[in-house]
Amino acid sequence: MNEQFEEWILKNTSQSISYEYPDYFTWFENLEFKYQWGVYLEFFDSVGIEIKDDLNGLHDFSYKIYHYDDELDIIEPFKMFETRTEAQQEAVKKAFEILEK
């Protein structure tokens, strides 16, 4: 996990969850990705990175990342994914790469 993400998640997580799950990061990483997705969106929004997942046709999924730094950068893969989850997972990986630059 990314250090900035860890700090953000601890700051923005309900204290009751932190007390109930002392090893919160292990608990979070073991959730199905669909439950992690909303947390990742909130985090990346807070650091100026917006992720959109797109449906292109019946079974083709992709994503776009809007990075609001000094100017707007739009990142789109030249790849289609068979499932929305695959596109979302790849988008999260790419967003972390952008964040760490």
Image (cartoon, grey):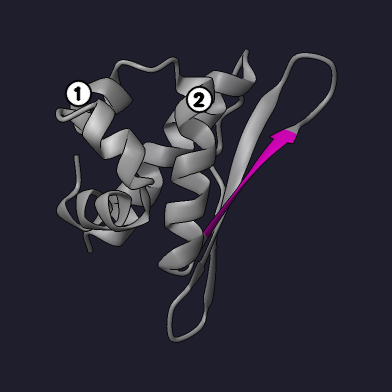
Q: Nearer the viewer, residue 52 or 23?
A: 23
Relative height, residue 56 to residue 65 (above, below): above
Residue 35, numbered circle:
2
Q: In the image, is residue 82 part of the stretch drawn in magenta?
A: no
Left or right: 52 with respect to 3? right
Residue 26, numbered circle:
1
Horizontal and vertical percent position of residue 54: 72, 36
Q: Nearer the viewer, residue 24 or 40?
A: 24
Horizontal and vertical percent position of residue 100: 22, 59
Q: Secondary structure at mark 2?
A: helix
Q: Give the class, few, some or many, for how many residues have Cα within 10 Å of label 1's Cα (few <14, many ≥20).
A: few
The stretch of residues the image draws in magenta is 50-54
Horizontal and vertical percent position of residue 65: 54, 54
Relative height, residue 34 to residue 1 (above, below): above
Sequence-wise first label, 1 or 2: 1
Q: Secondary structure at mark 1?
A: helix
Q: Quadrant of residue 11?
A: bottom left
Q: Nearer the viewer, residue 31 or 69?
A: 31
